[in-house]
Amino acid sequence: MQPVRSAPMPADAASDIDLVRGTLAREAAAFRAIMTRYNQRLYRLARSILHNDTEAEDVVQEAYLRAFASLAGFRGDSSLATWLSRIVINEAYGRLRKIRRAEMVPLPEEPGATRIIPFPLNASVVDPERNMAQREILRFVEQATDGLPEAFRTVFVARVIEGLSVEETADLLGIRPETVKTRLHRARKLLRAQLDAQIGPVLLEAFPFAGRRCERMTEAVMKRLGFPD
């Protein structure tokens, strides 16, 4: 009698360590599962630093490639989410330094040109009136958050929008928990006048990363890793 073999664990239910083992074995499903699981968090963190959707996407892609190339060195001392987040933050600050250096060289502007950052919306909203209201509210949240000083903004995104704990945020950013609390308090104080009416559940939908954007970035990384379509 042949032994009964259990079905393989679905990738979306696998532990981080299982997924790391899968990527080291070049299993496409493991790569996809990691990206699907952490795309939103990493994108939000990158965007909180760069203020630009396209730059944030590029940074997350580069961070994934860097992470996957050195995944054999992941020992599980911190969570995979924290490990990936640190790589993204380092990559984002590196990109920001390049952008700032480039901005020191004056470039001619086209007449009437304006800088517009499109705001990603939740594709699941189909009610036109709700869609319009959400568009205005989320744009307001995004603009208000972008206006925070950099140190406060990253803490605010990590704690309020991404939902990390004080300890997780401190570990992620390499600062003391007391500093996290102080910066979050000051961030909220700066935003309170503008956000009190909307600071509840709407923040959970701010800076979404799902649907076509998530799929597009995942497919781009898979292609660069050499997996067939």
Image (cartoon, rainbow, N blue to C red):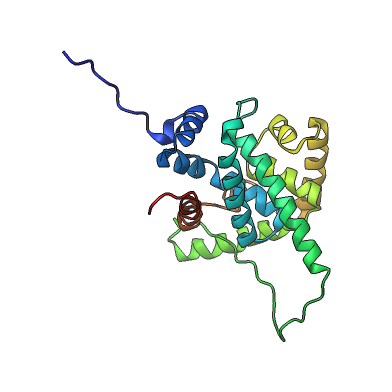
Choose between 1 and 188: the one closer to the eye.
Answer: 1
**Extreme bottom residue here?**
111
Position of the C terminus, as image quadrant, is bottom left
Q: Nearer the viewer, residue 4 or 190?
A: 4
Query: In the visual, does 69 lie left or right of 11?
Result: right
Residue 74 sits in quarter: top right
Q: Nearer the viewer, residue 104 or 15?
A: 104
Q: Residue furthest left?
A: 1
Q: How many marks?
A: 0
User: Would residue 130 be found to the left or right of residue 42 on screen?
Assistant: left
Instruction: Identify the residue at horizontal 73%, vertical 46% (top origin).
Output: 154
Residue 75 percent location from the top left of the image: 61, 26
The residue depicted at 78 percent of the width and 77 percent of the height is 107
**Can I make out residue 197 in this image?**
no
* Residue 141 image point, x, y percent: 67, 56
Residue 205, given in percent of the width and then of the height, sits at 57, 50
Is residue 41 visible in the rendered image? The answer is: yes
Q: Quadrant of residue 164?
A: top right
- Residue 14 percent across, percent down from the top left: 44, 30
Residue at the image point whose x is 63% and y is 46% from the top: 200
Tell me if residue 71 comes above or below residue 228 in the rendering: above
Indicate whether 64 appears above or below 117.
above
Q: Quadrant of the N terminus?
A: top left
- Nearer to us in this view, 83 or 229: 229
Measuring 78% from the left and 57% from the top, which residue is drawn there? 97
Q: Going by the image, does 97 lie left or right of 20?
A: right
